[in-house]
Amino acid sequence: MPDPSSPDSPGEPPAEALLRLAEAMVFAAPAPVTPRQLTQLLPETADADAVLAALRARYEGRGVALVEIAGGWQFRTAPDLAARLRRVVQVPRRLPRVAMETLAIIAYHQPVTRPEIEELRGAALGQGTLDQLLEAGLVAPRGRKETPGRPTLWGTTPAFLSQFALQQLRDLPRREDLLVDPAPLDPTPPPEPPPA
């Protein structure tokens, strides 16, 4: 009798026991689960990527979806239901505008020092703003810059990727796409001057 915890052959879908094990791990994990982490739990003959792909297919069209975020996999509310749930599910408090501006600067310019953030923002940065981002787990120190005073370098964390449903930093919108386009020019040509 074949082992129920491993696929019968490479071309067949993963066995039910492997899917259940992967499902339990992703559900219980506090952060996105990488295929490498799952491999440590599965039998040697199992393909973690195939198990995750089968599990993702199983959740298609359900109330929750298995999504790839921050280099791993995590269960999330199905995108088409998220807006309806916002009416009844308490949403965490939003960050103030200055914190969001600071977070955006860090995300796009990391690693970056506090004086560099202030220069890019054009305003001073209070310690409370950095403390909020640290407390939320969205930024973390990334060493020190080799300049006089050795200021702390700041960068985003995996929690930042997870919070904004990004798989990697390259998934951030391009800065050019975020700029407001100037008003289009009037396509009608100016009137011709009268003949002299």
Image (cartoon, rainbow, N blue to C red):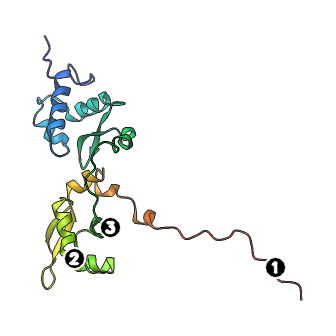
Residue 178 falls in image quadrant: bottom left
- Rendered location of residue 79, percent (x, y): 37, 41
Q: Secondary structure at mark 3?
A: helix
> In the visual, does 113 lie left or right of 86?
left
Q: Amino acid at mark 1?
A: Glu
**In this rendering, the label closer to the viewer, 1 or 2:** 2
Q: Find the distance from the CA under tag 1 to the CA under tag 2.
A: 57 Å
Amino acid, disc 2: Gly
Check disc 1: other Cα within 10 Å, few if <14, some if 14-19, many if 20+: few
Above or below residue 10? Residue 125 is below
Whole-number angstrom distance, CA of label 2 to CA of label 3: 13 Å
> Few, some or many C-alpha atoms within 10 Å of disc 2 (few <14, some 14-19, many ≥20)?
few
Q: Amino acid at mark 3?
A: Arg
Observer-nearest of 130 and 38? 130
The residue beneath circle 3 is 97
Q: Quadrant of the C terminus?
A: bottom right
Q: Identify which residue, 150 or 159, lies in the foreground.
A: 159
Which residue does the image show at 58% across and 70% down from the upper left?
Answer: 183
Residue at which label 2 appears: 126
The mark that comes first in sequence, 2 or 3, is 3
